[in-house]
Image (cartoon, rainbow, N blue to C red):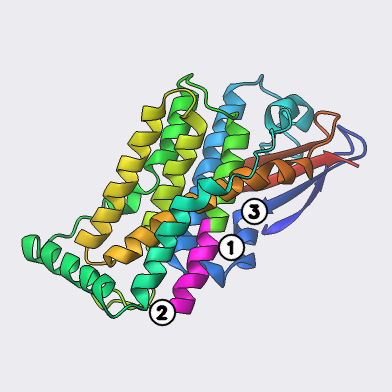
Amino acid sequence: MSGGYATTENIWPQKSTFIVTSEFLHNSVIVLVKSQMMKSFLITLLMMSNLARAYAISSIQPIQSIDSLNIVPADSVGRWYAGNPVAKKKFMPAAFVVPVLFAGYGFAAVYDHGPLKQLDVSTRAELQEDHPLFAAHVDDYMQFAPAAAVYALNLSGIKGKHNLFDASMLYVTSAAIMGISTHFVKQGVGRERPDGSGFNSFPSGHTASAFMAAEFLHQEYKDVNPWIGYAGYFVATATGTLRMYNNKHWFSDVVAGAGFGIAATKISYLVYPYMKRLFTTKKEGNFTFMPFHQQGNSGLMLSGRF
């Protein structure tokens, strides 16, 4: 089933559950999924859904399933998922100086025919001269490492700024902002890749994803230990460097990608408190937003009382 409604009248009167499966999501965004960045986003979303579900199930007592679906009742996990309202984050223009400068540099380099272009060309030439046969694809996985660290730290008992659900939603929001923005910029600019494999070089999606995750890790753990966040930026920088070694991006593509990724996460931390208030009320458990997996289908479920 690709999407539909499952009622729970025999268990909780006046309660409805809307289930969106991964197949339904795929059909809804089939155009956007054609981009490599959106494919990565959907894979990450499903991975996080399974992680969050596993964490929830391990934190509560077993409960009878609803209509043979492996979904725990909202009243049992509503407090964990809904939690307390997320504090609004004050908009600080200074926080966006670095990502704006990074993205601005990238755009300037795309249309420059002077020193910025020469820097792109010379950097590529030096890397290819030193490592002409370099072909490591670990960057395909490194881009997710800082975000995975957030889950690993949480599950090991080292709590960040938000509970696991809020952190997941912040990451999903960041990924959506980053994925959509880089997709349309790639299509609009149409810059050729260094290896000639396509015209979607600017900005670097892998680098954007890595720095988005690094900023996510930094935001969650900067008050616990700032070095945790610095480690995330190190991994993100290594990801961008590998994209150049693999001859997939110019130097300016990577710099701009870092700007897009950092900005996406900063924006999500600004807008998420308002988004959460759309799904929660003063009465805890009115709405529950959770992942599920049933008969090979993974997706998200919104459950609430009306």
Amino acid beneath label 2: Gly
Callout 2: SS? loop
* Residue 251 in view: yes
- Which quadrant would residue 213 be assigned to in this image? top left
Q: Where is residue 234 drawn, in percent x and y? A: 30, 41
- Give the labeled residue for mark 3: 21
- Residue 26 image label: 1
> Label 3 to label 1, Cα distance in Å?
9 Å
Amino acid beneath label 3: Thr
Magenta span includes 194 = no
Q: Where is residue 208 drawn, in percent x and y? A: 42, 56
- Which quadrant would residue 199 be assigned to in this image? bottom left
Mark 2, Cα crowd under 10 Å, few <14 / some 14-19 / many 20+, is some
Name the one closer to the observer, 92 or 289: 92
- Give the labeled residue for mark 2: 190
Earlier sequence position, callout 2 versus callout 1: 1
Q: Are marks 3 and 1 in contact (CB under 8 Å)?
A: no
Bounds of the magenta segment:
178-189
Mark 3, Cα crowd under 10 Å, few <14 / some 14-19 / many 20+, is many
Q: Residue at x 30, y 54 (%)?
A: 240
Left or right: 261, with 161 as reference point: left
Callout 3: SS? strand
Magenta: main secondary structure: helix
Q: Quadrant of the N terminus?
A: bottom right
